[in-house]
Image (tube, rainbow, N blue to C red):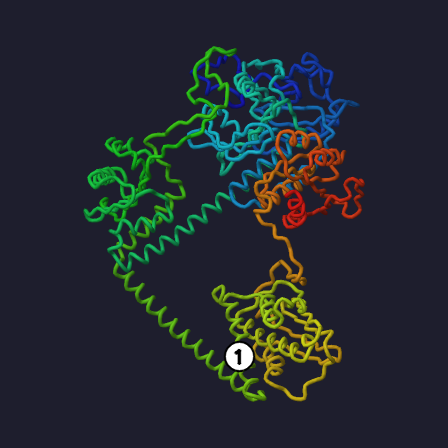
């Protein structure tokens, strides 16, 4: 049973009213702090019995007295100021390190309203100077990078565990019936996993789920601690204090027994609220007492709120993406049916179209009394009975059920094939339908123990006793199909509207579609004719210009062939992605490869990753080709020289290219202008409205080109490299496949990045933040490799390194010290990886370790 408080006055929990236990009406607090309740005129109305242990004043010393006679004036001033910030019925404000008594120790304090009362809760201030907003900002930044919902939930659990230090953190989601499932988990090595387990609704009853909506953060510091009563339990009117928002609220004895049966020593929960409903919880367990600091709890609560908003945004984005794709299917369906009315009676075709959007096991179509079935469906007689039932209940609207036998008893005879359906009407008359069927889902639900809890006489009398173990068992859900999701129902409604429009306007739509197809065909023929004429004109120009500068037939053929090949290579690059923009780097790299092969590193490239329009790309292909041809015949590439090509984008967005040759023979300006020189000097100004400058320096040719911004599509953030000859070890998933790697790292964010990098290489990863945890991990799991952060805050990883060396386990050090780290002589040969490191860096460093171990 879920978290609750001690029962209210005169309320006994038994088998019939367990789900109505008044968990918000307590009368007790947890002993790690104390509580004071004040009336509207700031008189002490209630005090927890342990107040003297914290501030030296007992309830008798305080009840009925003005708080100004008891607490320091500066403290009262701070409390009043903070109370003015309270907004909304469920708002709570916090103050850190506030001395309540003159000259006394500081306290971390929370204040809120409970009806007309002001409730003050305090606990001794911790020395934790954690900056909550900065910590949460880093956590959120990492969370935003998670790819997919599964990774997002798993990363959320990992970050909550890293922040709170609890042994187990689960992301627990509620189903419509109140039962729940563990969707993600982060846990300390050596404890059992609860991932994938289901829990019945009675574990977290209705009133507890309602309270989680109001009070989104809950901690139980020690399940064995003795709760402290509030004095008095009832006010003069007989009312108990509503402690729904209290941070120190004690725990229901039923829930305490539940946690003890699990061996849990402390628990913590953070509500996940999406679109105003309780989506689920971060449920945290620790197997010893644990109370995170006030700052850590505040940061965790803030992280939970931001996580909820990010989850809501992701769910909306996924739904919008799904519905967008569904609209495309609806458009395709409308177009096809408008041209061929017979397709409406083709169940197999309709099934293929609709299954792309709404997963199902079978489809039935009923039009003008004609039945067509495909996939897992009832027979025709049974389908006719379903249509009769739909005419009574669907009322020309989309209709769905996940348990057909409940609304149509005779359907139980074929429940193994059909248990759920989604009916889409095709006309305004209740006669024509497309019906999607889903088969019975014999789900093997992994319950955490037996859901049918037996009655036992425990310390709290006859009631539902929490399960004594977490043994899995399976429950077969018979006669029920996987329900159609709300987004799928919206898509079905869109399909209904689309199909209805097709049926009503079939003739007009078909004629319009045929006319559009004819116009597209005419446009395509005209465009093709235009492109063919341009290509023929270009080839004719190449023939003419090359012939005028050729000295022999062989020279003419060779030059013409090379120029046509250059254009072909450019065309291949810009049409590889359907005439999309192409990279300047690829153009130069391909041309250099043609001339130099494996020695293309003699052409050195440097610049941003620039994408050019297809037209500009073709022009530049000829220019680069002619420049490289000249360099190979007369310039730097004819000898042992090099060509350096640098490019950049100026403030106006124009592309500036600098070409420099060096190390070749002495350069002499040509005595005549051939076609190649003309292409170089005139193509860019003429075709692109840019600039081209050629300088024949004695030490080597120099050229400068300016391509206007209209031809520059985009500049991608990555930068192309200059070294294309040195091999790089690729970070492949197979590198560490089947190997267990120990990662020792005390920084939470770096540890998470390291885990992801190692997992991308195929490794199973165990992470430890201290040498003690590392020793424990080595004792529990065999380890093949290790990555050790040298500096672990107050200690180093040297003891772990010694232990690994004794066991013959290869390892490397990771450090932010760089080359300044001095290692002992015994570790002088150990590989040192500098932070920050990537997956490729780890792959390059670990490859020799793997080879040596082999």
Instruction: Indicate the position of residue 759 as horizontal and vertical percent values.
Output: 59, 43
Element under label 1? Answer: helix
Residue toward you, 47 or 800: 800
Residue 424 at least partly seen: yes
**Residue annotated with mark 1:** 561
Q: Is residue 707 above or below residue 104?
A: below
Which residue extends farthest front?
854
Image height check: is 808 above or below 192? below
Q: Nearer the viewer, residue 613 or 218?
A: 613
**603 relative to 775, above or below:** below
Quarter of the figure with residue 657: bottom right
Q: Residue at x 74, y 16 (%)?
A: 56
Residue 144 is at least partly visible in this image: no
Front residue of this view, candidates 727 and 462:
727
List x then y, in percent, for residue 69: 73, 19
Q: Estimate the x, y position of residue 350 in percent, counting from the top left.
A: 30, 50
Q: Position of residue 35 (x, y in %)?
A: 65, 20
* Quarter of the view holding residue 251: top right
């Amino acid at each position: 049973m879920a978290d609750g408080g001690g029962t209210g006055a005169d309320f006994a929990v038994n088998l019939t009213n367990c789900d109505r236990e008044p968990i918000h009406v307590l009368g007790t607090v947890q002993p790690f702090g104390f509580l004071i309740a004040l009336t509207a005129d700031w008189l002490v109305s209630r005090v927890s019995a342990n107040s003297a242990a914290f501030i030296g004043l007992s309830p008798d010393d305080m009840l009925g007295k003005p708080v100004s006679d008891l607490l320091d004036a500066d403290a009262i001033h701070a409390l009043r100021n903070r109370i003015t910030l309270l907004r909304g019925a469920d708002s709570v404000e916090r103050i850190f390190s506030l001395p309540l008594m003159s000259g006394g120790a500081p306290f971390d304090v929370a204040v809120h309203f409970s009806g007309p009362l002001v409730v003050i809760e305090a606990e001794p201030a911790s020395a934790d100077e954690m900056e909550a907003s900065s910590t949460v900002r880093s956590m959120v930044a990492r969370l935003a990078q998670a790819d997919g919902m599964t990774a997002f939930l798993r990363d959320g659990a990992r970050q909550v565990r890293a922040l709170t230090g609890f042994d187990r953190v689960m992301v627990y989601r509620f189903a419509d019936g109140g039962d729940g499932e563990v969707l993600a988990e982060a846990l300390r090595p050596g404890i059992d996993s609860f991932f994938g387990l289901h829990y019945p609704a009675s574990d977290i009853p209705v009133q507890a789920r309602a309270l989680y909506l109001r009070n989104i953060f809950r901690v139980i510091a020690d399940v064995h601690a003795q709760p402290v009563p509030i004095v008095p339990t009832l006010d003069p009117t007989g009312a108990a204090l509503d402690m729904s928002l209290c941070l120190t609220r004690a725990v229901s004895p039923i829930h305490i027994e539940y946690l003890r049966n699990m061996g849990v020593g402390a628990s913590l929960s953070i509500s996940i609220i999406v679109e105003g409903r309780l989506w689920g919880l971060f449920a945290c367990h620790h197997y010893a007492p644990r109370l995170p600091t006030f700052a850590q709890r505040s940061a965790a609560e803030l992280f939970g709120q931001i996580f909820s908003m990010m989850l809501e945004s992701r769910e909306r984005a996924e739904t919008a993406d799904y519905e967008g794709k569904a609209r495309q299917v609806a458009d395709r369906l409308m177009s096809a049916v408008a041209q061929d009315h017979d397709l409406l009676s083709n169940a197999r075709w309709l099934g293929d179209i609709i299954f792309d959007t709404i997963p199902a096991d079978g489809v039935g179509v009923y039009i003008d009394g004609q039945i067509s079935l495909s996939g897992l469906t009832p027979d025709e007689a049974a389908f006719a009975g379903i249509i009769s039932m739909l005419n009574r209940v669907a009322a020309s609207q989309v209709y769905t059920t996940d348990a057909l036998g409940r609304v149509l008893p005779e359907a139980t005879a074929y429940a193994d094939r059909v248990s759920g359906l989604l009916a889409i009407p095709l006309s305004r008359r209740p006669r024509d339908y497309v019906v999607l069927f889903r088969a019975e889902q014999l789900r093997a639900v992994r319950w955490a123990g037996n859901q049918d809890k037996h009655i036992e006489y425990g310390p709290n009398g006859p009631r539902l006793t929490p399960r004594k173990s977490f043994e899995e068992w399976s429950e077969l859900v018979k006669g029920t199909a996987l329900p159609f999701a709300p987004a799928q129902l919206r898509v079905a409604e869109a399909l209904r509207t689309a199909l209805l429009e097709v049926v009503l306007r079939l003739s007009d739509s078909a004629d319009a579609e045929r006319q559009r197809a004819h116009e597209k065909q005419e446009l395509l023929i005209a465009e093709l004719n235009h492109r063919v004429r341009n290509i023929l004109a270009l080839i004719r120009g190449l023939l003419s210009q090359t012939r005028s500068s050729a000295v022999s037939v062989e020279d003419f053929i060779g030059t013409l062939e090379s120029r046509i090949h250059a254009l072909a290579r450019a065309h291949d690059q810009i049409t590889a992605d359907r005439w999309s923009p192409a990279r300047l780097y690829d153009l130069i790299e391909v041309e250099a490869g043609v001339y130099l092969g494996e020695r293309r590193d003699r052409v050195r490239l440097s610049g941003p990753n620039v994408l050019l329009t297809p037209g500009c790309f073709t022009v530049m292909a000829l220019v680069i080709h002619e420049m490289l041809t000249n360099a190979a015949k007369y310039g730097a590439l004819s000898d042992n020289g090099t060509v350096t090509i640098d490019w950049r984008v100026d403030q106006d967005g124009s592309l500036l290219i600098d070409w420099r040759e060096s190390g070749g023979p002495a350069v002499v300006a040509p005595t005549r202008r051939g076609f190649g020189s003309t292409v170089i000097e005139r193509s860019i100004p003429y075709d692109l409205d840019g600039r081209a400058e050629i300088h024949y320096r004695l030490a080597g040719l120099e050229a400068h080109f300016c391509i206007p911004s209209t031809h520059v599509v985009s500049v991608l953030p990555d930068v192309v490299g200059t070294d294309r000859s040195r091999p790089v070890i690729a970070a492949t998933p197979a590198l560490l496949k089947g190997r267990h790697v120990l990662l020792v790292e005390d920084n939470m964010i770096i540890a998470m990045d390291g885990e992801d990098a190692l997992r991308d290489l195929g490794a199973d990863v165990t992470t430890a933040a201290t040498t003690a945890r590392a020793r424990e991990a080595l004792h529990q799991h065999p380890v093949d490799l290790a990555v050790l952060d040298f500096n672990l805050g107050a200690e180093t990883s040297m003891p772990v390194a010694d232990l690994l060396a004794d066991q013959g386990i290869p390892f490397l050090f990771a450090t932010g010290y760089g080359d300044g780290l001095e290692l002992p002589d015994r570790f002088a040969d150990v590989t040192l990886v500098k932070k920050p490191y990537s997956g490729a860096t780890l792959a390059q460093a670990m490859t020799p370790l793997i080879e040596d171990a082999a």
